């Protein structure tokens, strides 16, 4: 079977890229002939697939992001049409694909959630943004295209949003959760890393450590997290923020201005976050919108109870009071209370066990099996054969 997977570029810290890598590996292991249609895949593993590079020129000055995405979409559509593929799976909003993986969620939903924290002028700017209009129109055209047979949703929240915003039939919305490497991410990391990792930032052994991992600080709720931290009763709690962002310096300035300079630590992006999963007592992600963050699954697999938001797909695995809490991302008073609760769970053996148990079944092989089962279900000619 010939399969094409479409992803515009590689980001070593991106969750979608990790899914693509795992999908490529699973398909290659099944003997499929896999092609990756991409603009740039530098820095990523290159085994088991053929790369088709689509890097058409576009005007950064006059077209910007919309021109970039539009030019790649047109080039990818041409490659999909002439490649003779049995299955085309896109991770970009490109009309004409057979399968779309909604790893970035629903753009129309993201804009609605983001508008809650924007000023009236910013909301007007968002509404008339050429880029946002392009993405929403491409999203709508893709969901309405007759070639679309399935949308891989990585959380029930995303499936609900696609049905709500675009009326896609539920039968086309299989939920295939992100997989987590439960052998690499496990509660034993605490024994291995807790003491030595805390020492790198001079964090006391007894201080509760709440961990944030994610890139895109505005979307993932860092400003709300910092403001909520100022209301906490547990002034001994430390917050470690890991991730890349253009506003990293601005967030450091905000933390200092809020009087959190001694309690909040920014590490920047890290290739290996496992030492901090081992050093932390809880995980916090008050995101404005996140379909299914790998970091939350990794944290749970490491035995960390979590606080996340009602606009995060990871809410499915939270049992309030047992392995964490779910709050409205913009309700800073409620978030502050739950941060105190999370700090109070430090050392709670039952909470750590409940966190681990909530995602123990979401292994990488299980994800690959569900993905392959979807491919086999797409047509009777493939049902009885290997992919």
Image: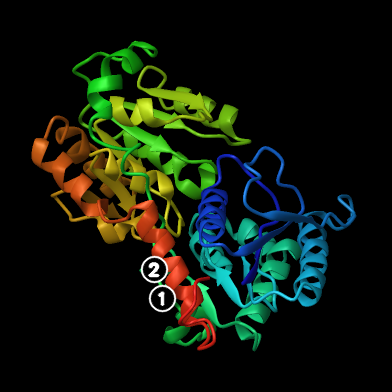
Q: Position of residue 145 (x, y in %)?
A: 66, 85
Residue 67 is drawn in which quadrant? bottom right
* Mark 1 burial class by Cα count in 10 Å: few <14, some 14-19, many 20+: some
Residue where numbered disc 1 is placed: 160
Circle 1: element type? helix
Q: Nearer the viewer, residue 23 or 69?
A: 23
Residue where numbered disc 2 is placed: 157
Q: Is residue 237 above or below residue 65?
A: above
Residue at the (68%, 64%) spot, across then down: 132
* Mark 2 burial class by Cα count in 10 Å: few <14, some 14-19, many 20+: many
Dots 2, 1 in contact, CB < 8 A: yes
Residue at the (25%, 51%) spot, across then down: 360
From the viewer's perspective, is 273 left or right of 350?
Answer: right
Residue 178 is drawn in which quadrant? bottom left
Q: Position of residue 202 (x, y in %)?
A: 34, 10
From the viewer's perspective, is 340 left or right of 60?
Answer: left
Q: Quarter of the image containing the N terminus?
A: bottom right
Cα separation between marks 2 and 1: 5 Å
- Is residue 153 visible in this depiction of the protein? no
Q: Is residue 117 above or below residue 199?
A: below
Residue at the (46%, 31%) spot, across then down: 242
Q: Nearer the viewer, residue 185 or 104?
A: 185
Q: How many marks?
A: 2
Q: Position of residue 346 (x, y in %)?
A: 17, 31
From the viewer's perspective, is 301 left or right of 69?
Answer: left
Circle 2: element type? helix
From the viewer's perspective, is 58 left or right of 206?
Answer: right
């Amino acid at each position: 079977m010939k399969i094409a997977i479409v992803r515009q570029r590689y980001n070593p810290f991106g969750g979608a890229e990790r899914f693509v890598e795992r999908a490529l590996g699973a398909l290659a292991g099944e003997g499929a002939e896999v092609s990756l249609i991409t603009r740039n895949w530098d820095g990523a593993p290159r085994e088991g697939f053929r790369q088709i590079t689509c890097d058409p020129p576009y005007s950064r000055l006059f077209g910007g992001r919309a021109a970039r995405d539009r030019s790649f979409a047109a080039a990818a559509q041409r490659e999909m049409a002439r490649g003779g593929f049995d299955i085309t799976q896109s991770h970009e909003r490109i009309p004409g694909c057979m399968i779309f993986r909604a790893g970035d969620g629903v753009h129309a939903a993201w804009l609605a959630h983001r508008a809650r924290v924007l000023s009236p002028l910013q909301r007007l700017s968002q509404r008339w943004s050429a880029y946002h209009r392009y993405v929403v129109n491409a999203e709508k055209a893709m969901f309405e295209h007759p070639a679309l047979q399935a949308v891989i949703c990585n959380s029930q929240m995303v499936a609900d949003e696609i049905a709500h915003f675009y009326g896609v039939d539920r039968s086309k919305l299989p939920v295939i959760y992100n997989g987590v490497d439960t052998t690499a991410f496990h509660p034993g990391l605490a024994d291995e890393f807790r003491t030595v990792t805390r020492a790198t930032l001079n964090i006391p052994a007894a201080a509760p450590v709440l961990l944030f991992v994610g890139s895109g600080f505005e979307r993932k709720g860092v400003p709300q997290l910092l403001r909520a931290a100022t209301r906490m009763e547990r002034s001994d709690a430390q917050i470690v923020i890991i991730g890349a962002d253009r506003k990293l310096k601005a967030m450091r300035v905000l933390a200092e201005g809020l009087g959190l300079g001694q309690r909040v630590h920014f590490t920047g992006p890290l290739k290996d976050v496992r030492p901090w999963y081992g050093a932390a007592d809880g995980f916090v992600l008050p995101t404005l919108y996140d379909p299914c963050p790998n970091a939350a699954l990794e944290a749970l697999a490491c035995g960390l109870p979590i606080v996340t938001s009602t606009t995060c797909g990871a809410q499915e695995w939270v049992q309030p009071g047992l392995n964490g809490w779910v709050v409205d991302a913009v309700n800073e008073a409620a978030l502050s209370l739950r941060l105190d609760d999370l700090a109070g769970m430090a050392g709670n053996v039952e909470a750590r066990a409940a966190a681990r148990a909530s995602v123990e079944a979401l292994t990488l092989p299980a994800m690959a099996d569900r993905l392959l089962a979807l491919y086999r279900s797409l047509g009777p000619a493939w049902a009885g054969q290997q992919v």
